[in-house]
Image (cartoon, coloured by chain):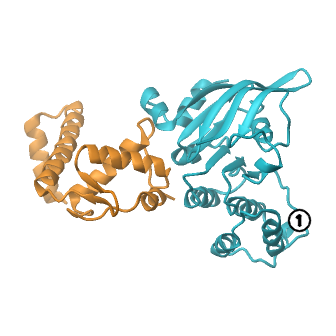
C-alpha cells in the first residue's frame, strides 16, 4: 500500500517533493486539476491532513492554486514550471557531483563519465 | 471540537498506578497513535474512555461528556482480543451490530466484506485469525462514530492484511471523528498518523504531530520511539 517514505524527514515535505516532480515532468500538466486530498491520501497511504499540509506548502510557492469551489490546480504559468524543473534537476546534478567528488573524481572526469554513460547505455 | 479530554486521569490497580495523572486533549479529525511499551497504560486508557473501567481519580470526557451509555453510542471500540461469539455467522454479526448501533452502516460493512471475499455464511470461529480480526475491524469501522478506539488492530495479521486495515482507516476518515490506535508496530502505522502519544509507566511523555517529531529529531517516529524507550 502507498508510497515509500524515507526515515527522518517530515512526510509532508516528501509528499511535496513527489508532487513537484510530477508537476515538473508534466505528469500533472499545467493548469490541470490535482487529485482531491482524500484520493491522494489513499494513493500515498498517508493521513489526509498530511496531504492538506503538502498542498498548502505548494500553494505558498504558487505552484498550485486553490479554487474555493472546484479544487486545486497546477499553475498554468509554464515559466514557473520550467524554473521548478531547473531547480530540481540542478539539485540532482549537485548531489551527483558531491558524491562523485567523494569518490575522488575531478570535475572534468565527472563530465566525461556522464557523456560516456550515455553511450554505454 | 475536542473529542477526548483527560485531566489528571489516574487509574490504580492496587499498588500499581496504571495511569498516573494523565492530561490529554485530542481534537476531532485526527488519527492518533497511542504508543508505549508493554504495561505503559495504553489499554487502560482506552478502556477508561470506553467506560469499561472507572478512573481512580481525575476526569475523562468524550465529546464533552463523562463516559456513560450516551458516550458509548459515540464510541466504536475494537478490543485487543476476540470478543465476538464464534458460533455466529458473519452475516448474523452484521445484523447484531445493526441492531445494537444506530450509527452502523450495513451497506458499508457489506461492501468491505465483499471486497475481502469474506463469506457471510461462514461461522466466525471457522475463520483464520487474520480474517477474524478483519471482520471485527470492519464491524467497528462501519459505525459512524465520533471516536474510534482501536486497541492493537494490526497485531497478529500479515503485512497485506495490515495494509488493508490501514487503508480501511483512511477510507473511512471523517473530519468530525477521531481515531485512536494503540500499537507496537509503529513503522507500519506512522504515515497514517497525525499525532503520536508516548506513554511511559502511565504518564504521557510526548504528544506531538508526527511530522514535528521527524523535523525536530531527524528520526522516524519508530526510530525516536526506540531511542526514548531503549531498554
In the picture, measured across the screen, residue A85 lies left or right of residue A6, that is left
Q: Quadrant of the N terminus of chain B?
A: top right
Where A58 falls versus B10 (above or below)? below
* Chain of the residue under label 1: B
Is there any visible trace of residue B101 in the rendered image?
A: yes
Q: Report the number of numbered marks.
A: 1
Quarter-wise, where is residue A25 in the image?
Answer: bottom left
Q: Quadrant of residue B34?
A: top right
Location of the C terminus of chain B (image quadrant): top right
Chain A appears in which tint? orange
Q: Mark 1 — residue? A: B86
Residue drawn at the location 76% of the way across and 30% of the way down: B59
Q: Is residue A121 left or right of residue B186?
A: left
- At horizontal 63% and vertical 48% (from top left) the residue drawn is B179
Q: Is residue A32 placed above or below B194 in the rendered structure?
A: below
Q: Nearer the viewer, residue B179 or B181?
A: B179
Q: Foreground residue, A69 or B34?
A: A69
Picture colour for chain B: cyan
Q: Position of residue A36 (x, y in %)?
A: 40, 61
Amino acid at each position: 500500500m502507498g508510497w515509500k517514505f524515507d526515515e527522518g524527514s517530515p512526510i509532508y515535505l516528501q509528499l511535496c517533493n513527489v508532487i513537484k516532480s510530477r508537476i515538473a515532468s508534466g505528469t500533472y500538466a499545467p493548469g490541470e486539476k490535482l487529485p482531491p486530498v482524500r484520493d491522494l491520501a489513499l494513493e500515498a497511504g498517508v493521513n489526509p491532513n498530511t496531504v492538506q499540509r503538502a498542498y498548502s506548502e505548494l500553494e505558498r510557492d504558487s505552484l498550485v492554486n486553490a479554487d474555493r469551489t472546484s479544487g486545486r490546480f497546477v499553475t498554468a504559468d509554464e515559466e514557473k514550471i520550467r524554473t521548478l524543473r531547473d531547480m530540481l534537476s540542478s539539485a540532482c546534478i549537485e548531489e551527483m557531483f558531491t558524491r562523485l567528488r567523494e569518490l575522488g573524481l575531478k570535475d572534468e572526469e565527472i563530465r566525461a563519465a556522464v557523456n560516456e554513460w550515455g553511450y554505454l547505455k | 471540537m475536542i473529542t477526548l479530554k483527560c485531566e489528571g486521569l489516574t487509574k490504580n490497580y492496587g499498588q500499581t498506578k496504571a495511569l498516573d495523572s494523565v492530561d490529554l486533549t485530542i481534537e476531532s479529525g485526527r488519527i492518533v497513535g497511542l504508543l508505549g511499551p508493554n504495561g505503559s497504560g495504553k489499554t487502560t486508557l482506552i478502556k477508561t474512555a470506553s467506560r469499561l473501567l472507572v478512573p481512580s481519580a481525575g476526569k475523562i470526557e468524550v465529546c464533552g461528556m463523562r463516559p456513560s451509555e450516551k458516550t458509548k453510542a459515540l464510541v466504536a471500540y475494537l478490543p485487543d482480543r476476540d470478543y465476538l461469539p464464534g458460533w455466529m455467522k458473519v452475516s448474523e454479526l452484521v445484523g447484531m451490530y445493526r441492531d445494537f448501533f444506530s450509527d452502523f452502516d450495513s451497506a458499508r460493512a457489506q461492501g468491505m466484506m465483499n471486497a475481502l471475499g469474506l463469506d457471510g455464511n461462514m461461522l466466525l470461529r471457522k475463520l483464520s485469525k487474520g480474517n477474524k480480526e478483519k471482520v471485527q475491524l470492519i464491524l467497528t469501522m462501519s459505525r459512524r462514530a465520533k471516536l474510534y478506539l482501536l486497541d492493537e488492530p494490526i497485531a497478529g495479521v500479515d503485512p497485506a492484511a495490515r495494509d488493508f486495515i490501514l487503508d480501511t482507516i483512511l477510507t473511512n476518515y471523517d473530519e468530525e471523528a477521531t481515531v485512536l490506535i494503540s500499537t507496537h508496530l509503529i513503522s507500519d502505522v506512522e504515515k497514517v498518523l497525525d499525532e503520536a502519544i508516548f506513554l511511559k509507566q502511565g504518564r504521557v511523555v510526548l504528544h506531538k504531530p508526527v511530522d514535528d517529531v521527524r523535523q525536530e529529531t531527524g528520526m522516524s517516529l519508530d526510530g525516536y520511539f526506540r531511542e526514548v524507550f531503549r531498554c
